Image (cartoon, rainbow, N blue to C red):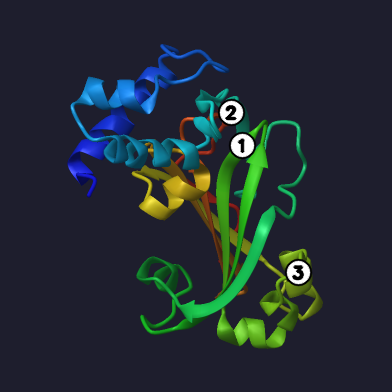
Amino acid sequence: MPNPFQQDKITDELRRDIVARKFAPGSFLPSGRVLASRFGVARNTVMAGLAPLVEEGLVQSLPKRGYQVMSAPAAFEVTWTQDGQVLPVGEQQLGPGEELRTEVRQAPTAVADLLQGPEEMTVVVRGTVHRYAGGPWALREFHVPRSVADVARRLSEPAPVDELRLLAEHDLAVTGLHSRWSTRAATVDEARLLRSGPSPVHVIQRTGFHGDEPVFCELMTVRADRVFLSQSHGSTLEVADP
């Protein structure tokens, strides 16, 4: 059985070597036998240590050839707009994203707080992955209270939709927005979906209000190693008083 500590060491050291360009894009990593000798482990432990690098898109496995180093996705500028959106510079809207999924679940505590609901409140979540310049850069989750989704029913369907326009069509137009930017370590699932390894992530919380009532909470989780901010309005952005 592979040793988790040893395989993590292999993953971390090879990731550092790839990021430092000790292995150029297009080149191949040493063979499993050579790596096993380098780290003093069995070959299956080497294979286990290489698996996360494949998931992160740093290397690709080519049958009978080995593990080829891939070019890292390019970094780019993003703008934190006045209405709390995070967009690649030059783009006017985020776009529908990919891998759209919808589900009904109990709201995490942070989301329940933003939506000013009870801890056990139920929300409909619309989740997407966003890609730019060669790789994933952001995960988006759009949370609405179940009561709102019961009115704007298309929010529960796994199909692209302009959520704010749909809310307005059902007399739930957004009249106020509150947005906040923070940074933290990525979770295991976030790192896998973003192919980011141990890189930290930016988290942008955006809450929309209809009058005094929150009608949605949007969470954008962004790879900190791929973006740099070209415009900021501070850690808290008030667009209108809810």
> Looking at the image, is mark 3 or mark 2 earlier in the sequence?
2
Is residue 9 shown left or right of residue 228?
left
- Mark 3 or 1, closer to the camera: 1
Q: Amino acid at mark 2?
A: Pro
Residue 233 picture location, percent across and down: 53, 38
Q: N-terminal of the two: label 3 or label 1? A: 1
Q: Are marks 3 and 2 in contact (CB under 8 Å)?
A: no
Q: Which residue is mark 2?
A: 73
53 with respect to 167 (left or right): left
Q: CA distance from mark 3 to mark 1?
A: 22 Å
Identify the mark nearer the N-term, 2 or 1. 2
Q: Secondary structure at mark 2?
A: loop
Which residue sits at x=73%, y=55%? 96
- In the depicted view, which residue is nearer to us: 112 or 35? 35
In the displayed structure, 37 sits above or below 50; it is above
> In the depicted view, which residue is nearer to us: 82 or 101?
101
Type of residue at label 3?
A: Ala
- What is the quadrant of residue 185 in the picture? top left
Residue 9 position within the rendered picture, expressed as x and y whole percent measured from the top left: 24, 32
Q: Secondary structure at mark 3?
A: loop
Taking the view exactly as shown, the residue that stands out farthest to the right is 169
Evaluate whether residue 82 shows in this view.
no
Q: Which residue is mark 3?
A: 159
Q: Amino acid at mark 1?
A: Gly
Q: Which residue is mark 1?
A: 135
